[in-house]
Amino acid sequence: MKAIVQDAYGSPDVLELRDIDRPEIGDDEVLVRVHAAGVNPGDWAVMGGLPYIARPVYGLRRPKNAIRGTDVAGTVEAVGTGVTRFRPGDEVFGWCGGLGGAFAEYAAVSEGALAPKPANLSFEQAAAVPMAGLVALQALRDHGNVRAGQKVLINGASGGVGTFAVQIAKALGAEVTGVCSTRNVGMVRSIGADHVIDYTREDFTQKDQRYDFILDNVANHSLSDLRRALTPTGMLVPNGGGFDNHWFASGGRVIGAHVLNRFVGHTLRPFLVSPKLEDLLVLMELTEAGKVTPVIDRTFPLGEAPKAMGHVGGGHARGKVAVTV
């Protein structure tokens, strides 16, 4: 089969299209004929071995899993002897374990990491859902306890996580404000934001409006400035940060949030996404009900996966980017 493989850490130039053997599946695994794969900042991080402190997990000198791509959508080709939920021909979506495997014609995926593909989504749309959707869902529902009537602000509303967060917050009944650049104002409004702030013209941390919950996906304001935009008992989830610091990425910001949380009335709650089948099923239901629709910026064929990674790594994708196989 054809797959995007890397032998060393680095820029998208380290990614190569090669012919390799199909993966073998275990008793509880499914062999998926991949039709599309989502591209995430996490894929970019593993490609570059960033932050350096994470290399014991990724692989010290090169990635333990040479194939990039986490989010996957496709058709079941074969199932392990212990698999009971799927059979060949089923259309599925989910995530690959082991920090990669989706940028290929076939992927071995744990049964517990797959759900039936929503019938109203294309494979490209379905592949865009898992990681970004799970981050948004867990940040808002589990950590933020967002509920009807609350005022929620999504900073970075036009990105992968942000576009899901706007729609999920609306599904939870919140009044949603999205923050984005001028070119994305119309798109963020079209996915349900009640209010949209163009950050090139206004600074929401300097306005009088206060929010019950802020999801910060871009880290372009200090924690103290973000707190200024919260209600007295509001909550901030700092999710962004990038990889400018090659050693720790956003680790310093996360530690700062934990420390500050002990001394202020606000709640600052950074977190790591925890992929769970039950949450993937919630996302499936939300998409099938029309409450959440993935926003696709553009798609790239498998052979152009390095370009797809470069586009996402640049930090300006509108919604999600997908690789078609």
Image: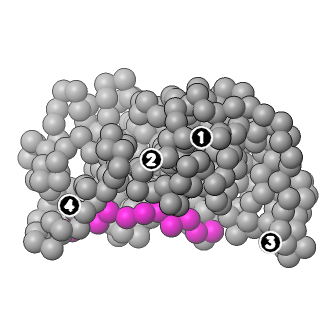
Q: CA distance from mark 4 to mark 1?
A: 32 Å
Going by the numbered disc 4, the residue's amino acid type is Gly
Between 323 and 188, the residue placed more toward the observer is 323
Going by the numbered disc 3, the residue's amino acid type is Asp
Q: What residue is pinned by disc 4?
A: 256
Going by the numbered disc 1, the residue's amino acid type is Ala
Residue 135 x/y as whole percent: 46, 57
Q: What residue is pinned by disc 3?
A: 28
Q: Earlier in the sequence, mark 3 or mark 1?
A: 1
Label 2 SS? loop
Q: What residue is pinned by disc 2?
A: 50
- Residue 202 appears in view: yes
Label 3 SS? loop
Q: Quick one: label 1, few (<14), some, or many (20+) residues within 10 Å?
A: some
Q: Main secondary structure of the magenta part?
A: loop
Q: Is residue 155 left or right of residue 305?
A: left
Q: Please check the rendered image and state whether residue 268 is part of the magenta-colored stretch, yes or no.
A: yes
Q: Earlier in the sequence, mark 3 or mark 2?
A: 3
Q: CA distance from mark 3 to mark 4?
A: 41 Å
Between 284 and 26, the residue placed more toward the observer is 26
Quarter in which the C terminus is drawn: top right
Q: Nearer the viewer, mark 3 or mark 2?
A: 2
